Amino acid sequence: MKRIALVLLFVTSLAGAQVTQQNQQPLINVSGEGKIMVTPDRADITVGVENVGADANDVKKKNDATVDAVIKYLKSIKLPAEDYQTQRVNLYRNYDYNKKKYSYTASQTITIHLKDLSKYDSMMMGLVDAGVNNIQGVEFKTSKQAQYESEARVKAVAAAKQKAADYAGALNQKIGKAVTVTDNTQTYYPRMMAAMKFNDAESADIPKETLAIGEITVTANVNISFELN
């Protein structure tokens, strides 16, 4: 009796699986990308102050004094306090095997959110005059990031839909409604690597900084599964 029941259960399950297979809607899975080219109107600039010496306390005090001058300069040009922030503070010991002596390096990096790129040149020269001796790089951004991301998403979906329609047309079929949508977008801000180091004696002779703004790309990537009819 148990054997008969097991056979009936197996036959029922097999029949159910066949019905499910027959009723399964064929799908087409495609990806799409949308790009919006934008002229950036702001930038994140990372600058640093570094001092080296034989005494840890003296080196730290000198570095702190320079950082204080840099922050006072940023305040003097009316840069909002929320637009600059300390990123890293370091104090470490080095050993010179040739001279058999220790030295100490104190450093601090500050990221500045510049919302008016026309002020870049004058601000950078002011920072150098205040004591900045390390420029690590610039990340260009746009104040309308959310708007451009939305536009890029619409373009990505349109691209995916067109791709699906092309494949379906080649199969003499049509696409139906979207079944699944997966956002694969990764936000990326282009970084202009402009690492520079210079000493105080060179500061006065530094030529005026130039900034090639160019364009940044706001991208959206999507994966969509459409029904095939």
Image (spheres, rainbow, N blue to C red):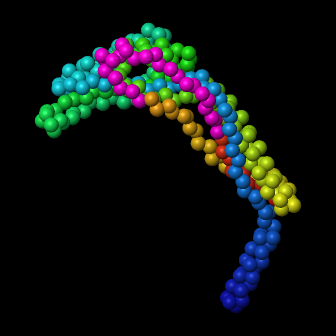
User: In the rendered structure, does residue 197 fall within the stretch colored magenta?
Assistant: yes
Q: Does the rendering let one see residue 208?
A: yes
Looking at the image, can residue 142 be seen? no
Q: In this orientation, which residue lies closer to the viewer: 95 or 26?
A: 95
Q: Position of residue 120 (x, y in %)?
A: 51, 17
Q: Residue 35: percent from the left, percent from the top?
A: 68, 38
- Specify the quadrant of the image occupied by residue 199: top left
Residue 34 appears left or right of 138: right
Quarter of the image with the N terminus in it: bottom right
* Quarter of the image that includes the C terminus: bottom right
The image quadrant that residue 142 belongs to is top right
Q: Residue at x 18, y 35 (%)?
A: 96
Pick the front one: 174 or 206:
206
Give the residue drawn at x 80%, y 63%. Answer: 25
**Number of numbered callouts drawn:** 0
Q: Main secondary structure of the magenta part?
A: loop
Q: Is residue 19 above or below residue 218?
A: below
Residue at 75 percent of width and 45 percent of height = 159
Which region shows up in magenta? Answer: 195-219
Name above or below for residue 45 compared with residue 168.
above
The residue lying at 59 percent from left, 42 percent from top is 186
**Viewed as shown, does residue 145 lie left or right of 168?**
left
Residue 214 position (above or below residue 74): below
Looking at the picture, how far across and down is residue 12, in whole percent? 75, 79
Q: Position of residue 217 (x, y in %)?
A: 63, 35
